[in-house]
Amino acid sequence: MKLTFSPASPFARKVRIAAIETGLIDKIELVPATVAPGTANDAYTRDINPLKKLPVLILDDGDVILDSYVIVEYLDDLAGGGKLIPASGPARWKAKADHSLLQGMLDSMLLCRYEKMVRPQGLQWQAWYDDHWNRAWAGMARFEQREDVLSGPFNVAQIGLVCVLGYADLRFSDCGWRKAYPKLDTFNQKMLERPSVKISVPPPA
Ligand SMILES: N[C@@H](CCC(=O)N[C@@H](CS)C(=O)NCC(=O)O)C(=O)O
């Protein structure tokens, strides 16, 4: 299998952590890909993902699996199921809903990043940026209160949360999340003891 990948991508990091945790990482070749809004990548759009986003898992028969959550679910299934996403019952829906919130936070953070990185300065819209940043920030506030996630069993929601925090460090390093959310800081430090989490920390920009 091949995974389109960028070391800075929090979505690709999520999948990498899942691949390590399920013991499948050695079966996956990480293939660097360059995709960004405003820049064409016709081959990628045509052959891999019309949405021009990574990560995408390319199976040995050429089928593609996207997006990052579905890839995590696929890997979890390949590994027997129930390792990263609870197999059934309320715990399953809780983990999936928590993950959806974290996914939305990452989407908003990425939009903030693109607003400053890609959009020409005269066209940038600060109120729009602030609105999206506030969504990510409010999401962190929500998880600061979620003892069940912070000290619960390792799962896709915990993976999503470390990816949010790692991305905040990478692209919004002066946002002050550690001071504002000390429980998230403790959680993040504990998670960094896991080799999968530590090895996948995005390299400094
Ligand atoms: N919902 C997607 C989001 C993936 C995503 O936004 N990836 C970013 C990289 S971090 C991307 O490919 N951006 C390129 C673009 O939007 O043009 C997932 O979970 O995989």
Image (tube, rainbow, N blue to C red):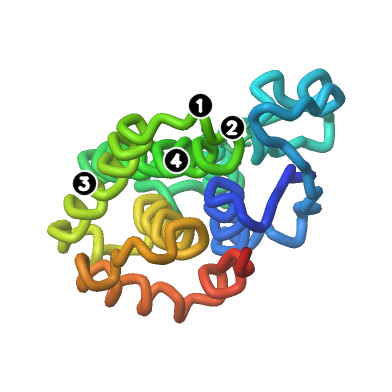
**What's the CA distance linking mark 3 and mark 4?**
15 Å
Given this view, does label 1 or label 3 mark the residue nearer the observer? 1
Q: Residue at x 37, y 78 (%)?
A: 189
Please state which amino acid type lies under the numbered disc 4: Cys
Residue 156 in picture, x, y percent from top left: 41, 51
Q: Is the C-beta of the residue carrying label 1 under 8 Å from the nearest atom of ligand 1?
A: no
Q: Type of residue at label 1? A: Leu
Q: Is residue 159 found left or right of 29 in the rendered image?
A: left
Q: Secondary structure at mark 1?
A: helix
Q: Which residue is mark 2?
A: 120
Question: Of callouts 4 and 1, which one flags the residue occurring earlier in the amino acid sequence?
Answer: 4
**Residue matched to label 3:** 138
Contact between marks 4 and 1 (CB within 8 A): the answer is: no
Residues marked 3 and 2 touching at CB (< 8 Å): no
Type of the residue with mark 2:
Pro
Q: Is 114 located above or below residue 170 in the figure?
A: above
What amino acid is found at the position of numbered circle 3 in the picture? Ala
Considering depth in this image, is 89 or 8 the residue closer to the camera? 8
Tell whether label 1 touches label 2 (CB within 8 Å).
yes
Q: Residue at x 42, y 44 (%)?
A: 109
Residue identifier under label 1 = 123
| Tag nearer the camera, 4 or 2 | 2
Task: Tell me if 42 is positioned left or right of 159 in this view.
Answer: right
Count neighbours of disc 2 (C-alpha within 10 A) and say few if under 14, some if 14 to 19, many if 20 or more. Answer: few
